[in-house]
């Protein structure tokens, strides 16, 4: 069973000039890290109406590792499970992107629509490591997400998951200078996206790591090699290379999960990827995705 002590973090824990605070936080973080994916899973009767004990169990895991996975026993849930799960954790402000439905929830499935086919989540192709909304402007930063599985693929579609705080810890342990490089405000630029009407999304330049006003660590990252521009200095490129090596390693802090029907990921926008998959033609893979501007309340 996972220990019950809450990890106390704040801006000083991530301040590269405050070694003492970092050491205390680091010790707690490593001590309480989940050993396997099963440490993150909580079985619930009805994800849309969690009991106090179920809520507390999910929150405890999010406090330690910024993520939890629920297994919903309720059959035939509605199309807004992801949004309703989020609401129970103080997540209200949805990033209602233009491909989402009227409720602001994205129905992620392979699409024959030519517009959606231009975006990898709506295909069966693998998706590299990333945090959601890395291309958003600062005022629309994605801090939390719920990904609910309605139907899994016939084969494939697994996710790898890594707490972004743990990625920061391992990077800082390896080289504080390289970690510092990823805090610079011009570390990563996502070029503008242009469609037939002109500029659909302006270029976004910003850091990989940043600290929110409440002291929480936020990460903005994609392992894509196209449609991304890294700051062209030796330290930043070395930091990116080290992060890529970390994410391609067999680190015990990288967890492997395949969401089956009724399962869902609740997280503070942790690092994740997706394997390619093959669908059952009559039961295609379908996930509900709700992305929020707040962090999970109590983390």
Image: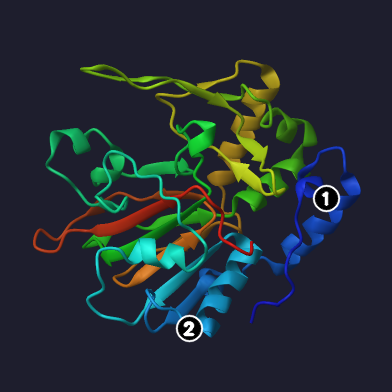
Q: In screen coordinates, is 190 left or right of 35?
A: left
- Identified at 66% across, 43% down, the residue is 212
Residue 51's tag is 2
Residue 225 position, x and y percent, is 44, 27
- Identified at 22% across, 58% down, the residue is 285
Q: In screen coordinates, is 159 left or right of 279?
A: right
Residue 200 or 25: which is nearer the viewer? Answer: 200
Residue 161 position, x and y percent, is 50, 55
Q: In the rendered view of the protein, which quadrant contains the C terminus? A: bottom right
As drawn, 253 above or below 97: below
Label 1 residue SS: helix
Q: Quadrant of residue 50?
A: bottom left
As drawn, 294 above or below 53: above
Residue 232 position, x and y percent, is 60, 15
Residue 298 or 236: which is nearer the viewer? Answer: 298
Which color scheme does this rendered protein use? Answer: rainbow
Count of numbered tags? 2
Seen as rendered, the residue at the extreme right is 20
- Identified at 87% across, 37% down, the residue is 17
Query: For mark 1, what is the residue?
Result: 22
Residue 222 can be seen, yes or no: no
């Amino acid at each position: 069973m996972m220990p019950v002590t809450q990890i106390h973090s704040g801006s000083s824990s991530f301040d590269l000039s405050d070694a003492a605070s970092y050491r205390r936080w680091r010790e707690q973080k490593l001590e309480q890290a989940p050993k396997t994916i099963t440490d993150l899973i909580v079985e619930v009767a009805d994800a849309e109406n969690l009991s106090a004990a179920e809520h507390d169990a999910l929150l405890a895991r999010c406090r330690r590792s910024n993520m939890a996975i629920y297994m919903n026993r309720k059959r035939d849930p509605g199309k807004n499970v992801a949004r309703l799960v989020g609401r129970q954790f103080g997540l209200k402000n949805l990033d209602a992107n233009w491909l989402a439905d009227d409720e602001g929830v994205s129905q992620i499935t392979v699409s024959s629509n030519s517009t959606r086919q231009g975006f990898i989540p709506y295909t069966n192709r693998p998706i590299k490591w990333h945090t959601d909304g890395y291309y958003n402007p600062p005022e629309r930063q994605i801090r939390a997400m719920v990904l609910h599985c309605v139907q899994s693929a016939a084969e494939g579609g697994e996710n790898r998951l890594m707490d972004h705080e743990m990625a920061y810890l391992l990077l800082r342990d390896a080289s504080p200078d390289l970690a510092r490089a990823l805090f610079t405000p011009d570390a990563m630029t996502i070029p503008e996206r242009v469609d037939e009407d002109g500029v659909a999304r302006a270029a976004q330049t910003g850091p990989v790591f940043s600290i929110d006003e409440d002291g929480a660590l936020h990460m903005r990252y994609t392992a894509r090699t196209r449609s991304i521009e890294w700051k062209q200095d030796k330290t930043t490129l070395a930091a990116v290379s080290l992060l890529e090596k970390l994410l391609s390693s067999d680190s015990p802090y990288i967890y492997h999960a395949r969401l089956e029907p009724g399962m869902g990921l609740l997280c503070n926008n942790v690092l994740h990827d997706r394997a390619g998959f093959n669908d059952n033609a009559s039961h295609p893979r379908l996930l509900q995705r709700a992305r929020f501007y707040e962090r999970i309340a109590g983390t």
